[in-house]
Image (tube, grey):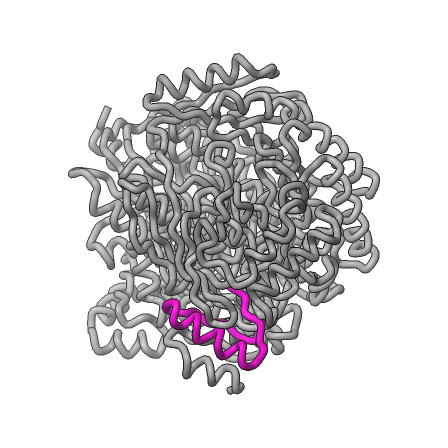
Amino acid sequence: MTDLEAALRRAVRGEVGFDTTSRALTTMDASNYRRVPLGVVAPRDADDVAAVLEVCREREVPVVARGGGTSIAGQATGTGVVLDFTRHMNRLVALDPQARTAVVQPGLVLDRLQDAAAPHGLRFGPDPSTHGRCTLGGMIGNNSCGSHSVAWGTTADSVRELSVLTARGRRLRLGQEWAGAPEGLRDLVDGDLARLRTGFPDLPRRISGYALDALLPERGADVARSFCGSEGTLGVLTEAVVGLVESPRARALAVLGYADEAGAAEAAAGLLPLGPLTVEGMAVDLVPSTEGLPRGGAWLFVETGGDTEAEARARAEAVVRAADVVDALVVTDPGGQRALWRIREDASGTATRMPDGSEAWPGWEDCAVPPARLGGYLRDFRRLMSAHGLRGTPYGHFGDGCIHVRIDFDLLSDAGVARFRRFSEELADVVVAHGGSLSGEHGDGQARAELLPRMYGAETVALFERAKALWDPDDLLNPGMLVRPAPLDTNLRFAVLPREPVDVAFGYPSDGGDFSAAVRRCVGVAKCRTTSAPGAGVMCPSFRATGEEEHSTRGRARLLHEMLAGELVTDGWRSTEVRDALDLCLSCKGCRSDCPVGVDMATYKAEFLHHHYAGRRRPAAHYVMGWLPVWLRWAARVRAAPVVNALASVRPLTAVAKRLGGIAGQREVPRLAREPFSRWWRRRGGRPAAGGGPGGDLVVLWPDTFTEHLSPSVGRAAVRVLEAAGLRVALPPTLRGRAVVGDGTSRSALALLTARRGGRVCCGLTYVSTGQLDRARAVMRRTLDLMAPVLETSAPVVVLEPSCAAALRTDLPELLHDDPRAARLAARVLTFAEALERHAPHWTPPAVNLPAVGQTHCHQHAVLGDAADRRLRASAGLTGELSGGCCGLAGNFGFEDGHYEVSAACAEDQLLPAVREAPDGAVVLADGFSCRTQLEQLAGVRGRHLAEVLAEGLAEGVE
């Protein structure tokens, strides 16, 4: 243990982390930069902060304050001690609705403050797109703004008083009329009043540099306001008094379509006199789909408010009338507005990939110009990008003249980094020529501080240096930011990554087969750290259960980054730090769809486990549950289900078995079906029942392991419903060879039936989820051999278990990327609802007419989509919305020893509360076997597959 670590452990009550994992998690923020800290401290209170500062000052160790780590300019990274305020100093201390103020700690997430203020009709004005994970301390440090700044300004406009500790341990209470000013600050201002009155651009989004002009006497000598945007370089914030604003009772959203982004930009300033709440802009190249948007190549999102919906709509319609648009729409439905705003909020991640999938990066993420000059600035900006052979997709706060953009800089080669520097220098000159600010929201950090002399001139920058010396004479607080900055092309986080592709098992088709590129997808936007209810979303259940960065998608990506870098994590694929971080990943695949840049941690986990255990003994659970299809087939072959079930009821015996097998002691062993699904199918005759239409489409029903051995009732119900819809059902072949399947028009499905004995198709899911990828590939290749006759027909493959369908859709072609049959089979896979919708479009399901609760399967949400399921439920009269999130069992995860508490916490997040609050008589829908098992074991509730509910409706003859 180092002297610094030992001293900190003696001095503070909060956690002190000098281990590899703690340091690796804080090497980066959401910028292009990386610095390796000595350690991380999570202080419990201001006394802890003071103790850390004293210990570090004695040893001349820098200190960096960190909130949500979503800064885009690099100011939340450092080489000394990082203060993590999110763990303990994250409380809302007080809220006074009458005074419209709140007292907050620096680690409080913005959404928590908004939730507390909302019942009083109040809100905090600024609202960055990261509102679900950014902290008030970080917002004050960067002087953050958000989409509503045209109405409510920047964070500095909402700050009343700040409690601050200086590096030398002074406790200051900052406010107006020089309250809390360090010695010498007033003299500095009085000695340079002319420069402070004339040397700062007058525009709504001037965030660059120190706000020394807030100390002018005519501006109230507001030390708290001047402190905002100082990026942790002047003092450490421990508490803040902030102002709240009245939230409109009703809102409307006018979406205005323009021919191009320049037209939208030029129109934005003209709408400001109408008093909008927001004027946001984005172009078509940032939008995955224009469905639901008015015609145009670019759009302004203009929000209006009022006491009533009619008043808000009237104001929005007035905006439309005043705007010269190609097309427009006005949305007053809150759900419709949220859907449109999600497009904008995800842009910071979406923009990280160009339309062709190539990478793009921050660096010039948020410069701002006077709103009236935005159109001209954007044209000059586009010309400069073209001159450098660069591409980007601008969007942002058009009403404030602030533009966000990610640019496809090549930050991996020396030549590319040199071009990055040249472009940055030239763009700084363009911004200044338009009267703008290098930063309009995210601060200067390392990305732009070096260029501040181009904006302010050498004399004003020297004034900044003198101000820094008054606050922090030892230069201990976030050195290298704002004054005496590090060069903008050093400390780039990509420099440490391997230049040659890493040998991997998966194909990573969206990343050119490069695992490093896949890991680089995580840019630190941290949507995975959102703790508010995700609605229909899934990501990230383990973070929501633990609150630990290590167990977030971003945290795991950071550890994988450091594993590839080899500086902190030095043992590569054998790393125990990476293994432990991935251990609580549920492989829910939620990040694959919910992460704005499509990080796929489930795949990365499988890849890591494959290498980590190569040639080594695995955990017992990998053998027990990874090879589950083998054990269940063996039990079925020898008809051992009654014996196994009887033994499972003997508590002492099962306790020993679970301990030996790495199974959580709290878990009940699921009962095996006495008659597997395929045996029932053969007993039935293996042919369509009388209900199957003679000319109906042929569909191949996939007998997944769970349906086959654990829930055959689901398979029987699906057969009944599919045949009632006029479809002809067949099962896959069980022998390799040239079995004739038929052309999809024959009246019998017998051609798909072969011998009773032989191979069985399997998606390989259990092997993939435990990282046994060699075995998974072997199983998948055998499956492709068996499915060869099916692939020669036009028959779709209907998969009832969502996790198996997702494995066939994604894992199969990505793991067997060298076998064209894999992609062909993946393209044939349909869910139960999709099969009915596409192949029996005129069939009317039974009218069940009951409320429905439950949870959309996480893999269905992430990979398959549930639009067809929603329509089928509506047709059957099943009302209500299913919850999001993950059930927490997630296949093998919830059964493994050590996972039970997290598994149960995930279920308590959304699923179990939704079931408890369900109306009487509600149908509990759960298409996944894991979801049904979790409901049964944690809540004593029987969940049913949608096929079972519809089959029951048919049996009852419901009309």
Q: What's the residue at 43%, 62% (across, down)?
A: 172
Residue 437 shown left or right of residue 148 in the figure: right
> What percent of the width, then of the height, locates residue 684?
33, 44
Judge whether residue 619 is colored magenta. Answer: no
Foreground of the two, 832 or 216: 216
Residue placed farthest to the left in the image?
920
In this view, 699 is above or below 307: below
Instruction: Determine the residue positioned at 62% across, 77% down.
Output: 570
Residue drawn 66% across the image and 49% down it: 362
Q: What range of the chain is rendered magenta?
A: 37-65
Q: Nearer the viewer, residue 501 or 614?
A: 501
Q: Quadrant of the C terminus?
A: top left
Point 57% across, 37% down: residue: 204
- Quarter holding residue 327: top right
Q: Position of residue 578 (x, y in %)?
A: 53, 70
Report if residue 632 is visible in the image.
Answer: no
- Horizontal and vertical percent position of residue 748: 45, 35
